[in-house]
Amino acid sequence: MPSHPSNHHAPASASKSTLTERLNAGEAPRASDTLLINEQTRLREAGGERIVKFGFGQSPFPVFAPAVEALADHAADKAYLPVQGLAAAREAVAAFHREVDGVDWQAEEMLLAPGSKLLLFALLKALPADAEVLIPDPAWVSYAPQARMCHLATRRVTCSFESRWQVNAVSLEEALSGRNEPNNRVRLLILNQPGNPTGLSLDHAEQAKLADVARRHDLLVLSDEIYGVLDHDGSHRAFARDYPEGTVTTTGLSKWCGAGGWRFGAMHVPAALGKALFSRLLGIASETWSSVASPVQEAACVAYQRTPALEAYINRQREILTEIGQWAAHELDAAGIRTHAPDGGFYLYPDFEAHRQALARHGITTGSELTQALLKKCGVALLPGSAFGAPAERLTARLAYVDFDGEALLATSGSVIAHPGLEKVRDGIHALTAFVKSLEGGSTAAGNT
C-alpha cells in the first residue's frame, strides 16, 4: 500500500499567495467611461432626479424599419454562418460603401463581427508584439485600453482646440520625427472621422496631407468610420480614398442605422496588406466570436440596400443632427465655452478653459471635477476629456446631444429646434451656459433643469 506524505494536509507556506490573491493581482482594465455614465444616470433617475443625459452616445433614432422587418422574418434562423460573414452581407456592405464613399471594396476583403469594437480589438491582437499604436488626444475611450490589453506600446498624439482636436500632417510628422525606431517596426495610427468625442473631421485637403505623411512613414492606419454616413452634409471622405494601400477601415450599423444593440460591425482589409494579416484576423474571429448572429446578418443585407426610403431616413437624421449641433455649439460658444460646430455624428467637445480661474475659486481644477459639479449642480451628465485620453487638468468634456425622441423628430419636416421633444436638450444647454455665467457672479448655484 503506498504511503502518503505526512504533510499532505499541511497549510500552504506563508510566503505563497492564495489563488484569490494571484487572480486579483495586477491592474485590471477599467469599465468603459461611456457605459459607466449611462449606469450612473440611470441610478440618479431611479432616485427621482431629472437628468439631461449628454453622457452616453447612443443613436436616438429608431432602426430602419425594413431592416427590423427582415430581422423578424429571420428570427428563427439559427445556423452558424461563416466566420468571415455571410457572403451576401459582405457584398451588401462593400457595395454600399463603394457607392457612398467611392472606395474599391470587395466582399472577399470584408470581415464581419458582433460590433466594430471587436474588430478593432482583433486588429490590435493581430499585430506583432513590438508594434506601437498612435492614438489621438482626445480619442474614443476604448482604443487605449484595448491596446494595453493586447500588451502593445501606445503613444498619444496631442491635439488642441486650434487644430480642431484633430491629428493633422504637422502633428503626426512631429510625433514621428527624431525617433530612433527600428525600420521594421509596425506602427498603427488610429483615426476616427467624424470623431468621437469631437464630432469633427479633417477637411479634404488636410486629410490628403496626413495621408502623405502616413505613406512616407509606412504607417498602418485604422480608420474608424462608424459615424461616416452621419456626416452632416454628406461630404465624408473615407481615408482609404487617400491611402488605400495602408488603411484598414471599420464601420457598422450602430450609428446611422440606430442599431447599436444589434452588434453588427464590418471591417475592410485591403489586399495590399497581404494574406497573412487577414488570415490572423480570421483565426482570432474563429476562436472568439465565431460568427455574427444569423438574423442580424440577414437584416444587414436589407439595411445596406440603397433605396429612396433609406436615403430619406439617413438625410432626415443628418438634417436634425445638423440643426441641433449647430444651435448647441453657438449657444455654448456665445457663453464663452469654446466649442467647434460639429461636422458629423452627434457630439460636441466644449472647452471651459476661459473659466479656469472662476472654476478654481470653487475648487474645480480638473475635467472630472467639472463634470461632477455639472451633474450635481445642473443635472447635466457629461464625460470629462480625461475619459478620452486628455490630461486630467484639461477643462474639456464630451457632450452627446441625443437626449430626445428620435422617432418623433423623424416624423417631422423642417426646423426642429423648437420641437417639444427637444426640451431636455434645450434645457441642458441652457443649464450649462447659466452655470458658467453664475461662476462669474460668484455662485455655482445654477440650479437643476
Image: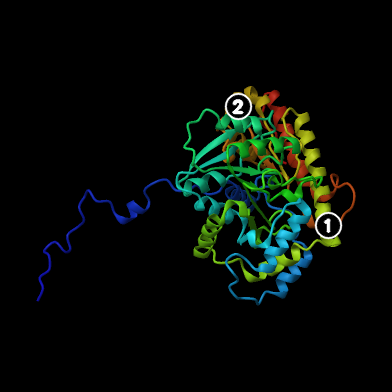
Q: Position of residue 397 (x, y in %)?
A: 64, 37
From the viewer's side, name the closer residue of 436 and 116.
116
Amino acid under disc 1: Glu
Please give the residue where the numbered disc 2 appears in the rendered image: 362
Q: Is residue 262 above or below residue 26?
A: below
From the viewer's side, name the closer residue of 74 and 418.
74
Quadrant housing residue 417: top right
Looking at the image, the residue that sits furthest to the right is 414
Amino acid under disc 2: His
Assign a secondary structure to mark 2: loop
Quadrant housing residue 407: bottom right
Q: Does residue 269 appear anywhere in the picture?
A: no
Q: CA distance from mark 1 to mark 2?
A: 49 Å
Q: Position of residue 144 (x, y in %)?
A: 53, 43
Q: Is residue 328 left or right of residue 351?
A: right
Q: Is residue 171 above or below residue 42?
A: above
| Res. 311 mark | 1
Q: Position of residue 141 (x, y in %)?
A: 58, 45
Check disc 2: other Cα within 10 Å, few if <14, some if 14-19, many if 20+: few
Quadrant housing residue 339: top right
